[in-house]
Amino acid sequence: MAVAALAILLLAPSGDPSELAVAAVRRELSVGHVGVVEAQSRTRRSRTRRTTRVVRAARPAAAPVIGWTSPRGTSELSADFSSMINTRVRSGKFGVMVVSLTRGDTLFAHEAGDMMQPASTMKLYSTAVALDRFGPEHVFSTDVLRDASRDSAAAAGGVVNGNIYLRADGDPSMSSRFWKDPNYPMTTLARAVAAAGIKRVTGDLIYDATAFDDQKIPDGWKTKYLGAAYAARVSALSLNENVVWVAVRPEGGSAHVELEPASTAIPLTNNVRLVRGSGGRIIARQTNDGIVVSGTIGSNSGPLRYSLVVPDPAMFTAGALQAALKSAGVTVDGTVKPGKTPAGATKVAAFASPPLSQIISEMNRESINVVAELLFRDAARASAPGGQSSADAGLANLREFLSKKVGVDPATINVSDGSGLSTLDSLTPRNMVHLLSYAHRGPWSSAFHGSLPVAGESELLRRRMRSTPAQGNLHAKTGTTDTVIGLGGYVTAKDGEIMAFSFIYNGTDRWNAKATMDAMGATLANFVRE
């Protein structure tokens, strides 16, 4: 059954679905949210300029600006916060907790023990367990290995008489976000294989994604999300955040179509017509037989690009390696298929990720769901049954971390994923504040703090709390879905007192709730204890 393509594109990052309206404009060419078309047009102006056609619902009106206050003492702070959360939204529920990390006392709590959906503030937990398990300098390694029982390739004239294996390590960074060119990771591996003297493999290219279980879509993800990049599939072997671009350009009197990154795993059917002019419009659909591309492109047009979520990330990544091996002059006689790497296999090449500190910074600042999913499972691999991680293993690992190190009741969190996109996720604001307190004093505190957006200045907080006492001060993780607004992080009071806070709203009056949270954040930055 064909999977219908979703519309024409304005590119969006793979983070919170409702935060994309702002983030999409800011990171237009990093990761796709199905449907964007870019064209070169000269029909209306003498000079060439890039145009983007958008078919999309209008952006919601900006949240109303709500004034912050200047409380002097905890009684005034409590009164101001109570007024804000009880009067400034029309419906729904707030859970709030603020603690002083300087003095160790609670400054405000409202329904702080109630279980609530966290949205992407859940990424604070995935960040913490990953840093605690690996440390900020950890790198992931995606390896190519060969059958150890065979003679070395060099001794056999460059021929591996057996299989080669692509073994996953749960690396979330093999994408254009980290390496500019989406082909770079597999191209680098393929060139290393060729540099090892291998010219031909008589067996198969076997991809090993058994570091995680086979569940590609976590429980509780809404069906309507599944065509979008922020709900890309989960696999231990992932490439380009499991999104593929279909690129079309005029070449040699016809329309040329290719995948970015290149992969042999997905057949392409090209039904695009070359027409006069510099415009055009394309659409790509996934079917059981691959990707079918249709539409038109002008003979003077620049490239048109369309993005799709990859249905089988591991197979797609292995196909990308096969394509890269062919370009590097290495032939694989057999097929591409799944399997497990034998214990005695010999490593031929490896691709190392950036340090974990850099990965979590990208994840939290742009709220990248697929990265959070991989890190959540990566952190649990050592304790997972058989070494194969899963969402369930991730929850068990997280609860153990919270119980033994953070010192909170593990029953106060119940999650089905590591990103917060699942509607089944729930936790308490009090639990989150305890996590923030632990992270503040932990050995990886600087990496944790440094990964968070800054109010009025960076990423998903760039347009929030500007020209308030929170600007340049408050740093926190955002969370947004259809029914959730969240904000959790740190802020320094006017007198230098450092505070950790968790603001969670569940309901439909999200824009007023967001404005209320911004007012509370600015109020904390303006707070003075008397």
Image: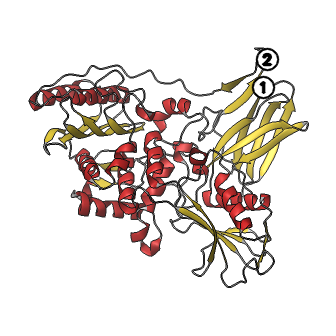
> Residue 87, relative to residue 392: is it above or below?
above
Q: Nearer the viewer, residue 517 or 91?
A: 517
Residue 179 located left or right of residue 499: right
Determine if residue 179 is in view. Answer: yes
Q: Check the image and name the residue furthest to the right.
A: 253
Q: Amino acid at mark 1?
A: Gly
> Which residue occupies the extreme top position in the image?
45
* Tag 2 secondary structure: loop
Q: Is residue 9 left or right of residue 91?
A: right
Q: Is residue 220 visible?
A: no
Q: In the picture, residue 30 is in which quadrant?
A: top right
- Give the color scheme: rainbow, by chain, secondary structure or one colour: secondary structure
In the picture, which quadrant includes the C terminus? top left
Residue 412 percent across, percent down from the top left? 25, 54
Q: Position of residue 152 (x, y in %)?
A: 72, 80
Residue in the picture at 39% in, 70% down: 383
- Residue wearing tag 1: 279
Name the residue nearer the viewer: 213 or 13.
13
Q: Please tell me which residue is depicted at 52% across the width and 46% down the height of the picture.
A: 231
Q: Secondary structure at mark 1?
A: loop
Q: Which mark is residue 437?
A: none
Q: Residue at x 33, y 26 (%)?
A: 515
Residue at 53 percent across and 31 percent down: it is 26
Pointer 2 and pointer 1: residues touching (CB < 8 Å)? yes
Residue 205, quarter of picture: bottom right
Q: Amino acid at mark 2?
A: Thr
Residue 242 picture location, percent across and down: 59, 51
Q: CA distance from mark 2 to mark 1?
A: 8 Å
Q: Nearer the viewer, residue 219 or 455?
A: 455
Residue 62 percent across, percent down from the top left: 42, 21
| Label 1 crowd (10 A; few <14 / some 14-19 / many >=20) | many
